Image (cartoon, rainbow, N blue to C red):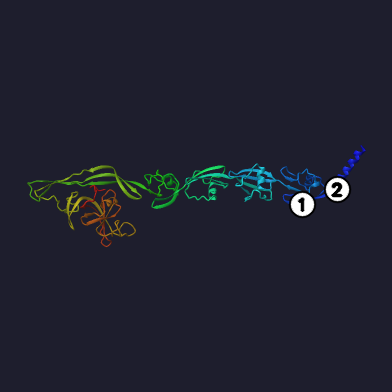
């Protein structure tokens, strides 16, 4: 018993001596070294003596329970708050870690990164084994690599990327795309997992619309969808060439035609004809009108079709006869010509008939006559604020030039009409007309202009235009 007491006292004296002796230890905390003189027995006691309270996530080398007898350096990596953002969905994980590199921090969260994955720490790119910055606020943005299977121009290939979006991944991999190319998934699609993408190349288009040519491109399957992409709408009777449901043309040319339908009401005059009979009891040269001729008059509703502002057709919707045609009947003596007598007034006794008429240029044959309202104009008397010396046909405005409606112009351009009191004129110009009336504008120069505003029977001189139906529009 006495022996045991003596041994215990010796051990106590040894421990007390060791503590009183003291020693120097280098303590490295988060990379900062401090030389500490201590009489502590363990690593944990040294740190405690420095006022350091350990957390369970702190990293200590050697462990806190290690005796100091063989320890010269203590390394302590203190844990600190960290935030992990996992792209592309921005999933957030808050944790504490004593990790010194991005790889160590992700490993603590159970993530083993691939070399193609990307990491940003506090907004800066770092390598997986680069040291994390000092400080308490650490934000790691982790972008795992995605597989993109791309079908372009009939060829399929696979690329790996950790870019933020599909478009950025294609740009980073040197894929040259054109405006209007179509993607089977959105161009801004975030990358994750495996994506299958089909790219349809756009066709360069030249769209002629409203007087301009719009240069654009589209990968739309039809003309109508390409027009909609360009902000062009077809309304009412508008149409396109090629049609809306056609595929995009190989040459890229599309024309949009604006159609306007206008309902017009006018009167149609049907000229009467002259029927001749011979009476041998009459003297040669004798003529007797046994029935006076009367032109037919009907009221019409006409639909006028304009394409891009130009009249292209007129369709009669309805027609009501206001006055029936009565053919004139003339009895002549034997050997008497059927040529009517020369009219003695502007109304003319042969109105509506087919025959000849005496003009200032001699006797002329005509194939139609009709009462027409006459007005007159000159280069500076066109009803506008500017002077114009050229006709629609490109000739000067002088006496002998006749202006008519566009419907008459298409039929009678270059043909002659005799107007009693004016003379023979040639249809070379286009005017607006007077609703509900046949109308001709008589041309003059500014120096010899004569004011006209009255209705006169005029004579359409032979030959008649090819294809003319005999009915005035």
In the foreground, 320 or 222: 222
Q: Earlier in the sequence, mark 1 or mark 2?
A: 2
Q: Is residue 270 left or right of residue 9?
A: left
Badge 1 local density, few (<14 within 10 Å), some, or many (20+)?
few
Badge 2 local density, few (<14 within 10 Å), some, or many (20+)?
few
Could you tell me which quadrant the N terminus lies in? top right
Q: Position of residue 101 (x, y in %)?
A: 67, 48
- Tell me which residue sits at (78%, 45%) in the image: 43
- The residue indicated by pointer 1 is 34
In the foreground, 271 or 365: 365
Marks 1 and 2, how far apart at CA: 21 Å
> Which numbered tag is attached to residue 20?
2
Q: Position of residue 452 (x, y in %)?
A: 25, 56
Q: Position of residue 161 (x, y in %)?
A: 57, 47
Q: Secondary structure at mark 2?
A: helix
In the foreground, 221 or 270: 221
Q: Is residue 125 left or right of residue 38?
A: left
- Tell me which residue sits at (73%, 51%) in the image: 32
> Which numbered tag is attached to residue 342?
none
Q: Is residue 275 left or right of residue 124?
A: left
Q: Position of residue 264 (x, y in %)?
A: 31, 46
């Amino acid at each position: 018993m006495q022996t045991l007491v003596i041994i215990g006292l010796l051990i106590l004296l040894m421990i007390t001596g060791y503590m009183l002796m003291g020693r120097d230890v280098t303590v490295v905390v988060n990379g900062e070294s401090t030389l500490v003189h201590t009489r502590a027995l363990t690593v944990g006691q040294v740190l405690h003596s420095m006022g350091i309270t350990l957390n369970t996530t702190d990293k200590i080398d050697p462990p806190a329970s290690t005796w100091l007898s063989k320890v010269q350096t203590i390394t302590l990596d203190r844990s600190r708050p960290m935030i992990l953002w996992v792209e592309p969905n921005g999933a957030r994980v808050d944790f504490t870690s004593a990790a010194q590199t991005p790889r160590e921090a992700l490993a603590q969260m159970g993530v083993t990164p691939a070399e193609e994955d990307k990491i940003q720490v506090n907004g800066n790119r770092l390598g997986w084994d680069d040291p994390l910055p000092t400080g308490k606020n650490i934000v790691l943005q982790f972008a795992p690599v995605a597989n993109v299977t791309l079908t372009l121009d009939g060829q399929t290939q696979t690329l790996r990327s950790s870019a933020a979006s599909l478009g950025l991944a294609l740009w980073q991999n040197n894929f040259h795309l054109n405006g209007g190319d179509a993607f089977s998934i959105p161009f801004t699609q975030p990358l994750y997992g495996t994506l299958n993408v089909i790219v349809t190349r756009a066709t360069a288009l030249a769209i002629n619309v409203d007087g301009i040519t719009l240069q654009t491109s589209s990968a739309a399957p039809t003309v109508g969808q390409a027009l909609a992409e360009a902000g062009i709408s077809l309304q009412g009777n508008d149409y396109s060439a090629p049609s809306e449901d056609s595929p995009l043309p190989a040459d890229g040319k599309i024309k949009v035609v604006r159609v306007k339908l206008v309902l017009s009401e006018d009167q149609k005059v049907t000229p009467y004809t002259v029927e001749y009979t011979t009476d041998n009891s009459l003297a040669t040269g004798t003529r007797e009108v046994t029935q006076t001729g009367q032109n037919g008059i009907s009221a019409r509703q006409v639909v006028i079709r304009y394409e891009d502002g130009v009249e292209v057709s007129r369709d009669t919707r309805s027609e009501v006869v206001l006055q029936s045609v009565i053919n004139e009947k003339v009895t002549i003596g034997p050997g008497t010509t059927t040529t009517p007598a020369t009219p003695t007034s502007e109304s003319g006794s042969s109105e509506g008939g087919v025959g000849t008429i005496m003009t200032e240029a001699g006797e002329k044959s005509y194939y139609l006559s009709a009462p027409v309202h006459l007005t007159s104009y000159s280069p500076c008397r066109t009803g506008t604020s500017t002077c114009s010396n050229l006709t629609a046909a490109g000739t000067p405005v002088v006496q002998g030039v006749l202006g008519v409606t566009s419907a008459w112009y298409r039929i009678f351009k270059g043909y002659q009409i005799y107007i009693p009191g004016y003379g023979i004129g040639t249809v070379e110009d286009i005017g607006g007309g007077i609703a509900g009336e046949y109308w001709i504008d008589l041309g003059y120069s500014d120096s010899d202009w004569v004011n006209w505003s009255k209705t006169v029977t005029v004579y359409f001189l032979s030959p008649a235009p090819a294809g003319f139906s005999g009915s005035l529009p």
